[in-house]
Amino acid sequence: MPGIAYQKLEARQLLFWGPLALNAAVIAAGLGAAYVMEHSGHIVTGMNNQIVWGTPHVFAVFLIVAASGALNMASIASVFGRREYKPYARLSAILSIALLVGGLAVLVLDLGRPDRLVVAMTTYNFRSIFAWNIFLYVGFLVIVTAYLFVMMDRRASRSTALGKTVGGLAFVWRLVLTTGTGSIFGWLVARQAYSAAIMAPLFIAVSLLYGLAFTVIMLAITGWQSRQQLAGSEMLQKFRGLLIVFILAVFYFTLVHHLTKMYASEHYGIERFLLRDGGTYTAVFWIAQILIGSVVPLLLLVWPKSGTRHAAILIASVLVLIGGLAQMYVIIIAGQAYPLDLFPGMEVTSSFHDGRMAGYRASLPELLLGLGGVAIAMLICAIAVRLLPLLPRPAT
């Protein structure tokens, strides 16, 4: 981009290779966990016949949704013409690619038969949202890679029209991708916790929030490694304002989602389970998702004495991601724990646990596999910023 200088990450050996080695170790542990699950079967996990999507799916969906939102800076710069965000567009693009790859890696390794992915990629049922998502994920990787090329190539970057066209396509595609991911749950009528059209806009809102939080954290890490202030005070305040808006948007859609469910008597049982009688799930919802993931970050950002401090914005971003994982846990795990309503208006009991709340406790292999996906994303980003000029050069 004319007038904007970019640089590779120039960090001291320990500051770069230390975190890199840690990520590599976590990835190795995740691959080991995937091998154990593949060799021994899913009996070593906390999953069962009622809860077939476990903690790895929580991490996978979390990373996939965050990948869409990580493109925030590039979209704001190219689609909406806000030039002050352009220095962060390249990092935004590579972060979105890395997060999607990390999420898909967890998803593939959690299938139990990763080799069956070939069948999923060659045989399609276009009445299934899962089949459509394969096109959405692959298309996103191709389009964002092309977008990154347009931003980095000297000749292509001179064409404003080309940048806006590819940027606009990436913006539309990311919205469609997140809508498709949210629709996985919104179109599942068998589960009372799902089956809601608002799942699509809710997932779009959470993607904007998680992606921005990842971007703030990534800027902080690379700034610490390079011993430079990659984002000035003015830009950090813009990030702060966006975080506040996105937190409120997620809270609003979450509120509307639950109020809508409570309005219909057929969904009163699941809402009572999630909000009051769900035990661990209720605690995760109120403490981790609402308190830690929304209320505390919002207070940190709006409080006059802390909201303008860099550390407060960073801490708020970390808390938002913790709350995001909790939100995905409640949506995915708690949604399966509540029994299927096989015969509405009647009580169902059987030797197959019909009509009972399903128990679930994440096992170590599941946690390691999920964390391995996060480590893959961070490793890709670390290598990319080391080899390519993706970081803005601070003005001197």
Image: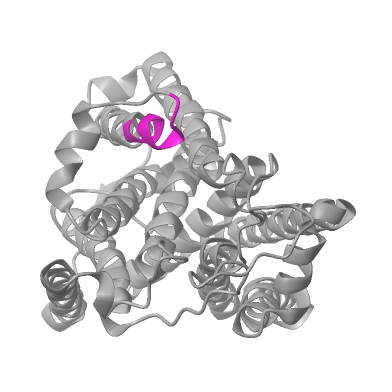
Residue 124 to residue 311: above or below = above
Residue in front for this viewpoint, 51 or 87? 51
Residue 1 to residue 289: above or below = above
> Considering the image in quadrants, where does the C terminus appear?
bottom left
- Judge whether residue 392 can be spotted in this image: no
Percent across and percent down for residue 89 are: 40, 43
Task: Name the side, left or right, on which 346 lies relative to 172.
Answer: right
Asked which quadrant contains residue 23, the reply is bottom left
The reply to whether the magenta stretch includes residue 132 is: yes
Task: Name the side, left or right, on which 193 lies relative to 71.
Answer: right
Asked which quadrant contains residue 271, the reply is bottom right
Residue in front for this viewpoint, 68 or 45? 45
Residue in front for this viewpoint, 245 or 280? 280
Percent across and percent down for residue 203 are: 58, 48
Residue 253 to residue 37: above or below = above
> Considering the image in quadrants, where does the N terminus appear?
top left
Percent across and percent down for residue 321 are: 51, 69
* Magenta-drawn stretch, dominant element (helix, strand or loop): helix
Residue interval drawn in magenta: 127-134
Task: Name the side, left or right, on which 317 lies relative to 343.
Answer: left
Task: Name the side, left or right, on which 264 lies relative to 199.
Answer: right
Q: Which residue is drawn at 12% across and 75% down?
A: 32
Residue in front for this viewpoint, 186 or 394? 186
